[in-house]
Image: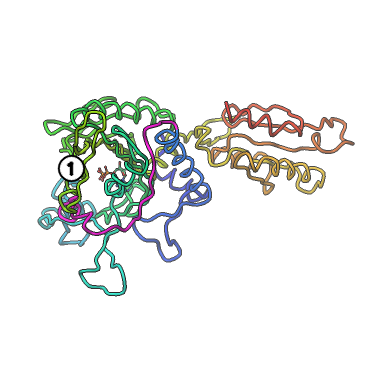
Amino acid sequence: MPDMETIVSLCKRRGFVFQSSEIYGGIGGFWDYGPLGVELKNNIKRAWWKAMVQDRGDIVGVDAAVIMNPQVWVASGHVATFSDPLVECKNCHHRFRADKLKSDACPDCGMRGQLTEPRQFNLLFQTHVGPVEDDAAIAYLRPETAQGIFVNFQNVQQSMRRKVPFGIAQIGRSFRNEIITGNFIFRDREFEQMEMEFFVKPGTEDEWHDRWRDIRYDWWKRTFNIRDEHIRIKVIRREATTIVGPDPDDVEQEKPPHYSKGNYDVEYKFPMGWSEVEGIASRTDYDLGSHQKLSGKSLEYFDDETKEKYLPYVVEPAMGVDRSVLVALLESYQEEQVRGEKRVVLRLPHALAPIKVAVLPLARNRPEIVAIAQEIAATLRPHMMTVYDDTASIGRLYRRQDEVGTLYCVTVDHQSAIPSDEKYDGKVTIRDRDTMEQIRVPVAEVKDVLVAKLAS
Ligand code: ATP
């Protein structure tokens, strides 16, 4: 596995991720996705939406506002308890999360015994709504997308005539004023989440919790092609925290969050160690119950068949898009030796690759070659993400495309385009990223061949 610096450097050099507001020195915990990053991110989001919404009959989507009535965050517990313990080093004045420190020495200046007593630091970002900046106008940027689903539970259930069990999915931005950010896009202050709240009949939640653990574990493995030794499940119960999968002894004991009766965390083996990429929480009726109490509106569900009325229980798979982008890059990055030279190749799964095909004219000063190459690119564009590149020698162009995971390169050469060339065949070369195998295909068939390859 590559180290983090390798991935950070690749991301900047090749247009995946840039530091936010870089020309002003950046801003900690915020990142901008570049042209390739946004494609990769969109592909991951599409894969999730397809698996969670389109391919199933029992989940529908919403897209709720980032800013909600502040009472939402009172009911959810975030205003009172969404905090981390903050300590400050009296010597260098740097701040840390007390629960992440291994000793009483400052991680930055090394001074022992200079850390202040921990105080609870609330992670909610505050803003004001409307022209008056008084306390009555305080609002929060959402720290999770889940609450936008809970408060719409009845709207969705009734407008879509849904019967429990069913789910509501959402992709969107969340904001947390994390004390310490870092490890690139792993921990940000603005990030994207993909969350799904699955509403079930009380008493069936354990069964659904296990089922969602299996579905989500499979999705991660399949979507990112993750090796068995890089993924595991952390089982967090009130009694104990245990690991199912690799490195079972490498585990810190923790308690489920305040809203959960138990969590399964999907963990990935990042360069800095095993860390959460998705939490699958058994949220009971905590959220619907709290909103019902504070709003005074009944959120109960009436089951037509059994004539029972109840607050559904909830199982929630919640993942971070940015962390999954990092997983995609780390898991796909490979360096290999090809004819004595280092080849860097991003073996991204087909569905995730930002660019599916690059069209490369072998000689940019030959109008016949350029004309055919441009025509092929134009034919391919409506069908797949296509780039055209004539800015370097062919060896260099191949290396650039390998490094960003482009699945196929189409090369137009003299033999393809110049009838007076003695080897003229009117065919172009299609090169496969993974095998580097090259086939010759008539110009008119390039689109069909590539569409068929992508479909398989
Ligand atoms: P952590 O323990 O790492 O802070 P968490 O348990 O607070 O995470 P959840 O509240 O369960 O995280 O959020 C669900 C998912 O959202 C996480 O698995 C992660 O992928 C993503 N996520 C949470 N916080 C951040 C963040 N600051 N930056 C990027 N992604 C995040």
Where 312 falls versus 136 (above or below)?
Answer: above
The three-letter amino acid code for the residue at tag 1 is Tyr
Ligand 1 - quadrant of the structure image? top left
Q: Position of residue 411 (x, y in %)?
A: 71, 37
- The span shown in magenta is 55-82
Q: Position of residue 274 (x, y in %)?
A: 29, 35
Which residue is denoted by mark 1 in the rendering?
286
Whether residue 121 appears in magenta in the rendering, the answer is no
Where 274 falls versus 389 (above or below)?
Answer: above
Q: Is residue 166 left or right of residue 382?
A: left
Q: Looking at this view, is 296 or 252 the one in front?
A: 296
Q: Looking at this view, is 116 or 317 the one in front?
A: 317
Image quarter of the C terminus: top right
Q: Residue at x 53, y 33 (%)?
A: 350
Residue lying at the far bottom in this picture: please name it: 132
User: At numbered mark 1, what does the secondary structure look like: helix, strand or loop?
Assistant: helix
